[in-house]
Image (cartoon, grey):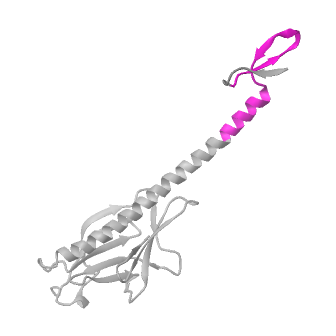
Amino acid sequence: MIHFQGLTGTRFSRRRHGTIRAGYTLIEILVVISVTTILSGFLISYNSTGRQMIAIQTERAKIGQMISRAKSLALSNYTKNPQPCGYGLHVDYAGGTYAIVGYMDPGNCVSTSTIDFTNFIVIESSTVRSPLRLRRPIAPARRLDDVAFVAPDPRVYVLSEGAILANGSASIRIVGTPGTPTGTVSVSTAGQINF
């Protein structure tokens, strides 16, 4: 005969000769240990994936914030000394960095067509932390190398692999270890940032 005493979960069983012994069987203990092991395995793998997803989302937010700051710099410095002519975000995929840059113009910023997008000064730089990396987007999306804002409009120039895009958008892909989700930041030729 089996009976329970109280709500504590202690189990009592009646054995031969009328003695009462407390305890669980070996099978019950093994089942509890195996279920606990499986659940803790899920938690550990979820925790590392979750950490990487948070890191990817943080990098996406930082890139978006730096693009917005470059646009603000282009607007706020318009009436000041004409150098630099515009501000933007430059992405270095090999080095894993992205930076707010000021674009220089040998023609003293008279025309936006004379701005040299390879001639810039770095204002603020950020490096993607390991294990994250910057990668080109999955085709057919175009790779974002630079996005430049030139006042007074501000005019937006999106550069992809050496060419200024006439329309559309270009993207940066942020990846972690294999098997984890990736994040993408896209900038359109109208200056709209998409995550």
Residue lying at the far front in this picture: please name it.
Answer: 6
Instruction: Identify the residue at image location x=64%, y=42%.
Output: 39
Q: Nearer the viewer, residue 159 or 3?
A: 3
Q: Which quadrant would residue 44 be assigned to in this image?
A: top right
Q: Residue 103: horizontal and vertical position, in percent?
A: 24, 78
Q: Quadrant of the rendered structure where residue 24 is? A: top right
Q: Is residue 59 above or below residue 146?
A: above
> Closer to the camera, 40 or 94?
40
User: On the rendered image, what quadrant is the C terminus found in?
Assistant: bottom left
* 174, above or below 143, in the image: above
Residue drawn at (27%, 74%) of the image: 71
Residues in magenta?
9-37
Furthest-right residue in this view: 16
Residue in the image at 36% along x and 66% along y: 63
The percent coordinates of residue 112 (x first, y second) are: 23, 88
Q: Is residue 125 left or right of residue 179?
A: left
Residue 96 figure quarter? bottom left
Residue at x 79%, y 30% (from the top left corner): 27
Estimate the x, y position of residue 120 in percent, counting from the top left. 24, 75
The quarter in which the N terminus is drawn is top right
Residue 93, how many percent across, how many down? 41, 69
Is residue 67 on the magenta stretch? no
Instruction: Report how many numbered discs are placed on residues in the image.
Output: 0
